Amino acid sequence: MFEFLQDIGNYDDRKVGREEVNGFVISTAYTSDEGYETAIVDKNGAHPVERYSDIVEAKEGHQKWIKKAKKFKTEDEVIKLGAWSGLVEDKKIKLLKLNERGTKE
């Protein structure tokens, strides 16, 4: 369950791609606990949005999310993937661009 601790300090070795797009960061990397995944980084943190079985799928998925991110607006919703075989459940979140303020709900 704590395999992710192996990932501290070695992002560049695990990275498939990382781009800043439209006020968000799209990051795809290998993680010790979940394998290859793409995460959207916004003002509220990193949100895994897709996982892959190998590096080829990860590279394709990374490009797909870059294209999607070009159309994102603040408070668009995505599904943040859960973790650890369902221990943490998927949940819908609103994105907040890195350089913007959100609205109160």
Image (cartoon, helix red, strand yellow):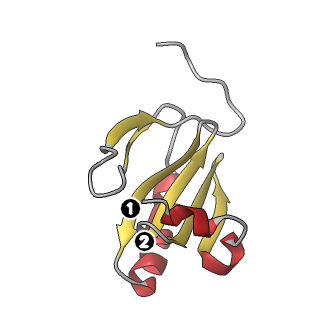
Q: Residue at x 59, y 62 (%)?
A: 5
**Residue contact at pointers 2 and 1, CB within 8 angstroms:** yes
Q: Is residue 80 found left or right of 86 in the rendered image?
A: right
Q: Which residue is mark 1?
A: 50
Q: Amino acid at mark 1?
A: Glu
Q: Which residue is mark 2?
A: 61
Give coordinates of residue 83: x percent, y percent.
37, 54
Most foreground residue, 3 or 80: 3
Q: Which quadrant is the N terminus positioned in?
A: bottom left
Q: What is the crowding at mark 1: few (fewer than 14 residues within 10 Å), some, or many (at least 20)?
A: some
Q: Which mark is residue 76?
A: none
Residue 31 versus residue 24 in the image, above or below: below
Residue 2 versus residue 79 in the image, above or below: below
Give coordinates of residue 85: x percent, y percent.
28, 58
Point out the residue furthest to the left here. Answer: 86
Q: Residue at x 70, y 73 (%)?
A: 10
* Residue 93 falls in image quadrant: top left
Give coordinates of residue 51: x percent, y percent.
37, 67
Q: Residue at x 42, y 86 (%)?
A: 56
Most foreground residue, 66 or 14: 14
In the structure shown, which secondary structural element does the residue marked by tag 2 occupy? helix
* Residue 26 falls in image quadrant: bottom right
Tally of numbered discs: 2
Q: CA distance from mark 2 to mark 1?
A: 8 Å
In the structure shown, which secondary structural element does the residue marked by tag 1 occupy? strand
Of circles 2 and 1, which is in front?
1
Mark 2 vs 1, N-terminal side: 1
Point out the residue furthest to the top here. Answer: 104
Residue 18 versus residue 97 in the image, above or below: below
Can residue 70 be seen from the camera position used here?
A: no
